[in-house]
Image: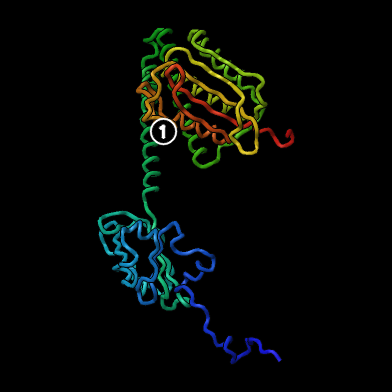
Amino acid sequence: MSVGTSSAPGSREARRPPAPRPPGDLADLAGLGIGPDDLPDGLVVADEHGRVICFNAAAERITARRAADALGQPLETALPLEDLEGRRWWQLTDPYGGLAIRVRQPERNLLLPGGREVLVCARYVRTRPTGPVRRVVVTLRDTEARRRTERSHAELIATVAHELRSPLTSVKGFTATLLAKWERFTDEQKRLMLETVDADADRVTRLIAELLDISRIDSGRLELRRQPVDIGAAVGRHIQAYVAAGQPADRFLLRVEQPLPDLWADPDKIDQVLSNLIENAVRHGEGTVTIDVTPAPSPREGEDTGTSVTVSDEGPGIPEESMNRVFTRFWRGSKRGGTGLGLYIVKGIVEAHGGTITVGRAPGGGAEFRFTLPVSAPAYLT
């Protein structure tokens, strides 16, 4: 008769103690196969006595304090926090002796020693409702990313306010003058004033359209209405408009390499991209503005072909140190007007189509912008 192991009550296997579990709620993390140091946010956990039992790597980075120095310390010592008025946060909130029905502290800005700002929220873990606090779980986030976003929004508001002030002041001034002194002006003077008002109104409309585009790009809600696009013909229309406005025809060189793949894109958005790039070349560049339209490898995985458009000029070009800032908000290549938002919007439109855009130095020494779009043909055509 062979003897095997038994798990019946009283056996050695049954009397074996269970495997140790990580302290407190950290057992749930361990059950998922991750540890506190894998979390992107700072995590500080205190036990029922207010002693720190977890201080992860992100908390070390954010607080500039070693975990070895924090573990076992009282929570208010390991993580001394003050509110923006200089009051000690743990004394204000009193997690262990405060309201028995409280289960959390919402996220707020607090200060570490030295004045560094962090985003802090806390949860009070109780064994039962209104029971004693078993754990205090605190998460920490660096505020730098939020500050950058807030600064960007503040810059956007300041730029928009500045750009709107000038045309609106002009519109108000001319309309007030015309209303007050209509009879004193000749028809030619009235026409000139009204043309100025019309141009300034167009400028305000363009700025509002740019703001709406930025909002949609930043939120990922830029809508595309894809249709077949003859991009060579689209470039040709822009060139004809500049020639009709007085630019010499020989300033533009359009080269289209055939055959081009069928391109499905939003024609209005592609016109916006072309308009911005060609206008930049005309306004800020010199010499011949060359536009090359060629087949190219698709930037999208799983597609073979795409369409590439390169716009280059023979001007001074973009300084090497500015290349990495060209597609950011408010970048201006010169002081000759503009909001500095155009190329940011261009990049957003191209990327919304699944394409890529780059900037470099043209063979003639000027700036060279090149964007490549996938063909993006509808599924029923493939």
In this image, 355 relative to 55: left or right?
right
Q: Quadrant of residue 78?
A: bottom left
The location of residue 212, given as percent across then percent down, is 50, 35
Q: Residue furthest front?
A: 1
* SS at badge 1: helix
Q: Nearer the viewer, residue 203 or 352?
A: 352
Mark 1, residues whose alpha carbon is within 10 Å: few (<14), some, or many (≥20)? few
Q: Quadrant of the C terminus?
A: top right
Task: Classify the position of the N terminus by image quarter.
Answer: bottom right
Label 1 sits on residue: 324
Q: Residue at x 36, y 23 (%)?
A: 334
Mark yes or no: residue 135 visible.
yes
Q: Position of residue 103 (x, y in %)?
A: 44, 69
What residue lies at 37% left-to-right and 21% top-to-bottom? 336
Q: Residue 267 sits in which quadrant?
A: top right
In this orientation, does residue 121 appear? no
| Residue 116 image position (x, y, % from top left) | 29, 54
Residue 364's place in the image compared with 145, above or below, is above
Q: Is residue 378 left or right of residue 138?
A: right
The amino acid type of the residue labelled 1 equals: Asn
Q: Image check: 198 left or right of 177?
A: right
What percent of the width, then of the height, locates residue 159? 37, 32
Determine whether 141 is above or below 265 in the image: below
